[in-house]
Structures are given as structure tokens and as C-alpha cells.
Image (tube, rainbow, N blue to C red):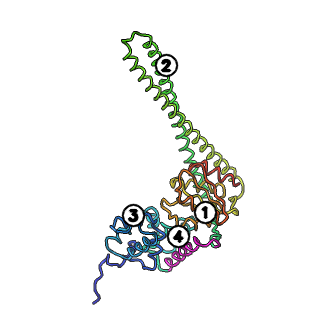
Amino acid sequence: MPPLVLPGEGVPVKGMRLKTWQISPHYHCSIIGTCLTTGELRQLLVKLGEPEARAAGDHALHARGVRLAGEEGTAGKLLNKALDRRHDAIIKRMSKLGDADELRRFWREAYDRGDISGAYWALLSHPATDEKLKRDVFGDVHMLSHLVGSASRLDIARLTDLQRTVEEKDEMIARLERRLEKTGSERDEMRREIARLQEAVIQAGAASAAAEAASRRKASAPSEEAPRSGELAQKLGEVREELRRQQARAEEAEANAAELQRENETLERLLSSEDAADEGAGVKVRGAAEGAILYVGGRRSLYDKLRALADVHGVTLLLHDGGMEDSTTLLPAVLAQAETVLFPVDHISHTAAGIIKRACRESGKSYQPLRSSGISSFVAAIGARG
């Protein structure tokens, strides 16, 4: 009679996601290199008490991470927790898929968007992923690693199909309308704040004038009033400082309100252009032959809105967060699929900006720093292409 093997002893339980030690060691190197950043791997090894983790080079860290992937003990479990925590959102989305065909379609969509790291781990650990699909996605990631080091292969562009169904256009317009409504509310609130601050400035000005008048009166009074005059002078200084702060806040609020107004007007123009486009026949895709745009950095919370705005302009948009969650080692490969690169200077790391500039110089591609991560800066940049 064969020995009984309990769940958790290296054998996957049907219907449950796989751990790294339950996945073939053939894939461990690509999982560690693609799905965790060097900083995250170093932090994990320091937590595990590895004596050389803080000073170890990137290759040494990678090699240790690959060995951990095959261990079922505490270290291996912490490694799996780190992978799951980092890619929690995409794991939850992929958990709703039930067969290899659905998983393959999900992978292709993620790959075309440049969302490689999370989708790779979620797919390899998914219980419905068969060996053929594992080999195929491993091949995709393996070839990406070659693209990073070869300028000629970096020229292999991947154009996403820009033709959208009427339902997709309706959803895009709905997202824009929701954003328009939100910016309108924010603008109204900002205007109320400006009015409040202006009233505070007026009151502070009146208090300053009263304090100055009192100070002048005390200055002409007998010498026994000198202590009181000193108190009034101190109070006058405090009032003036408060007036300065209120004026600064009012100016900042007015600048924010102006930015919201510009964003609101931009969204209104986009919605108007969509309405006009709907009067024509079919979906008109503009700029598809011009190639894709890669947007690096910025705020991930705005990515869906940026995609919708790019669709309105007929632009293929690729996204990479500059190393917050997406590995910077894959940035050159994603950049290879784009014609030009945009990045907001207020929301990008120095490392990612350096990679962009160096890769663009080597490949002859253009890049454009944006003033801010706001929607209006993005729209102005892609609008200038048309």
C-alpha cells in the first residue's frame, strides 16, 4: 500500500493556489526575477536574519531568493506571503477565472498592457493553469529578458487593437462623466474655501489695523504704559504673521481651483468631441499608425482615467508605475513597445527617469517630462500629437 501524503507536503491540493515549492524549479528563477523587486527581496532576507543580505549584490540576492522558492519551511512561506501581498489585486481578479483558455486571454491582455509581474505570479500559482500555458507564459517572460539587453529586439513593437465596441465606448464616456462630476464638486468646494480664506484675510487685516492704531496711541501715552505697548507690539506681530499665512493659503487654494477648472474644461471638451464623433459612421481610431505611448510613474489611482482619455484620442497607452509595484527591470522591454514616453516629474523615481532617458537615447525614441501627474498635463501632451 503506497504511503499517505498529507496536503502541505509539497503536493498541491486541487482547487487551491500553488506555493512556489509546488511549482517546478524550472520557473523559480523567472518568478523571483520578475515578480519581486530587488529591494523587496533584500527586505525579506534581512527579516529572515540573512547575515549578508544588507550588503549583498543583486545577483547574490536573486540566487538566494531562487533557493528559498524551493523551500517549504518558514522562509519559503514568508516568500510566498510577500509575493501574494505584492500582487493581491491581480490575484483576486484572476481567481474568478476557471479554465486555461480564460487564463490565457487574461495573460495576453495583461502582457499587451505591460502588466507583467503580477499577472505572471497569479497565473503560475493558479490551480487551473496547465503545463502548456505555463511554458508559453514562461517563454514570453524569457524573451522579454532578452529584449531588455538587445537594442535591435527593442524595436519589436506590439500594437494593441484600438477598435472598441459600442459598449466599451459607452463605459469610457461614463467614466469621463463621473470624473467630470467629481471635479465639478471639488471645484465648488475649493471656491467656498477661497471665500472663507478671503474673509479671514479681511478680518486679520482689520485686526492688524486696530493693533497698529492702539500701538500708536500707546506710543504717545506716559512712560508707565510702556509694558502695555510692548504687549501690543507683540500682538501686532502675531496678527501680521497670521495675515501672511491666510494670504498664502488663499493663493494656494486659488491655484488649486484654477487647476480643477482646467481639468473640468478638458473633460468637457473630450465629452463634446466624443458626442461629435458618434454622429459619424463607426469607430474612428486616430493615430494608431503613430505607435504607442508609454506613461511611467504618476498616480496608479488615475490609470483607468488615463486609459479612457487615451482611447478618446485614439492612442495606444502602455503603463508602468516606475518601480512602485512594477519591476524597473522590465521597464526597457515595455519601453520597446512604445514610440514615445511620458513621465510626470513630480511622481517618478530618479532611477526610473534615468532608465527612460538612457533607453530613449540608445533607441532613438522621444520622451517628454510632464509638469505634473494631473490629468490636464497628460491630455495636453497627447493632444499635441494630433
| Residue 251 point in image, percent of width and height | 54, 34
Marked residue nearer the N-terminal end (1 or 3): 3
Q: Is label 4 or label 2 in front?
A: 2
Mark 3 and mark 4: span between their CA atoms? Answer: 29 Å
Q: Residue at x 58, y 42 (%)?
A: 259
- Amino acid type, label 2: Ala
**Residue 210 visible to an observer of this rendering:** yes
Real-space CA distance between mark 4 and mark 2, rounded to the nearest whole angstrom = 69 Å
- SS at circle 2: helix
Circle 4 residues within 10 Å: few <14, some 14–19, many ≥20: many
Q: Which mark is residue 209?
A: 2
Q: Which residue is mark 4?
A: 107
Q: Between 157 and 43, which is closer to the camera in this rendering?
A: 43
For the C terminus, give its image quadrant: bottom right
Give, as a single range, the part of the protein colored magenta: 132-152
* Residue at image coords 59%, 39%: 258
Give the amino acid at mark 4.
Trp
User: Dot 4: what SS?
Assistant: helix
- Under circle 1, the secondary element is helix
Q: Is residue 162 visible?
A: no
- Distance, label 1 to label 3, CA atoms, is 28 Å
Spatial distance from mark 4 to mark 1, Cα to Cα?
29 Å
